[in-house]
Amino acid sequence: MAKMYYEKDCDLNYLNGKKIAVIGYGSQGHAHALNLKDSGCEVCVGLREGSKNWAQAEAAGLTVKTVAEAAKWGDIVMMLINDEVQADVYKKDIAPYLEEGNALAFAHGFNIRYKQIVPPTGVDVFMAAPKGPGHTVRSTYVSGKGVPCLVAVEQNATGRAYEIALAYIAGIGGARAGIMETTFHDETETDLFGEQTVLCGGVVDLMQCGFETLVEAGYAPENAYFECIHEMKLIIDLINKGGVAAMNYSISDTAEFGEYVSGPRVLPHEETKARMRAVLADIQDGTFAGRWIAENKSRGRTFFNSKRDQLAKHPMEQVGEELRRNMIWGGDKDLDTASN
Ligand code: NDP
Ligand code: MG
Ligand code: MG
């Protein structure tokens, strides 16, 4: 069993006198910076010049500096920019300003696990990785809850890296939900596996297949959207609250019977697991990481961008947009107030 930590195990005082530079103000960046500020920490945001988020961060009451200035100012530098640009930004604007005793922090282990960033030995290297989208990290914090987080320490130069990491996670609200101890190695591999096979890759493909099957059989696209896409969240919310049992309690016995009969027909258990093991092997041996780095460095994101364009044009996205726009409350499009 993994070691778990909660609020009683975290001491925010380990952040006393420490300046925290949050690099990036996207999904995770805005949530970390605002939550830490609201927890009484000394925070600044580091952004590139001309960033569209500069004014937004200032309007939220945060101090904003360039990435290099923020890295120079900070005792803890949290990397919340896209994984694929972190190595270049680190080399140019962060590494030159890291001093002995500083901490370099991450919300995902990709660049450490695949050695795109190799920090100097005198600094702490820790991970504070929320297991949820940044907008939920913010909305749950505001409502007195939190998103579960992973903690890991790659380098403990000061001997206090764990205490500082736990304090940081308490500052963003994660200790309210639970903190699991792991390693950069395990976090990176399980995170990539989860998002590729189940959460993003798996779910999107499953919904798309269901939508297309119904529409191709002559049913209304609106019907297919409600059935295979919109209802997904309602079902997942029940599982999230009380496990599969809570969902099975709420759905009809007919639906539960169909779950047992047809689930394994569309996802043959052993075959699906064999395919998942192949995906995991590509993650473990660096094949996936190499492909993602090459997609950015030498292929100009042509595959990535063409897939994104293709999906935007898919009827499930277009029908969904129309249906959500016409909901009496205008749909739940404001990510910052999403209740998930
Ligand atoms: P976003 O894409 O939402 O935000 C990226 C931020 O990085 C933006 O502020 C952007 O700047 C900035 N940025 C991008 N390129 C550069 C550059 N070349 N120089 C300076 N700044 C740059 O990122 P996420 O929040 O999704 O991801 C951040 C980290 O958190 C990643 O390591 C990711 O794996 C991890 N993570 C993300 C989760 C999520 O919920 N999205 C969940 C858990 C972990 P600008 O404002 O100028 O556009
Ligand atoms: Mg991820
Ligand atoms: Mg039903």
Image (tube, helix red, strand yellow):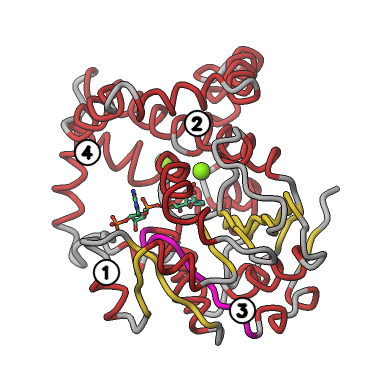
Q: Secondary structure at mark 1?
A: helix
Q: What residue type is disc 3 on?
A: Lys
Given contact means CB atoms under 8 Å apart, are the residues at marks 1 and 4 in contact?
no
User: What residue did someone put label 4 on?
Assistant: 317
The residues colored magenta run 17-26
122 vs 273, nearest the viewer: 122
User: What separation in Å lies between label 2 and label 1 (alpha carbons)?
Assistant: 32 Å
Q: Secondary structure at mark 2?
A: helix
Mark 4 nearby-residue class (10 Å; few <14, some 14–19, many ≥20): some
User: What residue did someone put label 1 on?
Assistant: 54
Answer yes or no: disc 4 within 8 Å of ligand 1. no
Q: Earlier in the sequence, mark 1 or mark 4?
A: 1
User: What residue did someone put label 3 on?
Assistant: 18
Q: What residue type is disc 4 on?
A: Glu
Q: What residue type is disc 2 on?
A: Gln
Asked if 203 appears above or below 21 in the picture, the reply is above
Indicate which label's residue lies in the foreground, 3 or 4. Answer: 3
Residue sticking out furthest to the bottom: 40
What residue is rendered at 73% in x and 45% in y?
183
Q: Secondary structure at mark 3?
A: loop
User: What separation in Å lies between label 4 and label 2 (alpha carbons)?
Assistant: 20 Å
User: What separation in Å lies between label 1 and label 4 (alpha carbons)?
Assistant: 31 Å
Q: Earlier in the sequence, mark 3 or mark 1?
A: 3
What residue is rendered at 60% in x and 44% in y?
109
169 vs 208, nearest the viewer: 169
Q: Earlier in the sequence, mark 2 or mark 3?
A: 3
19 vs 177, nearest the viewer: 19
- Residue 22 belongs to the span the image colors magenta: yes
User: What separation in Å lies between label 3 and label 4 (alpha carbons)?
Assistant: 45 Å
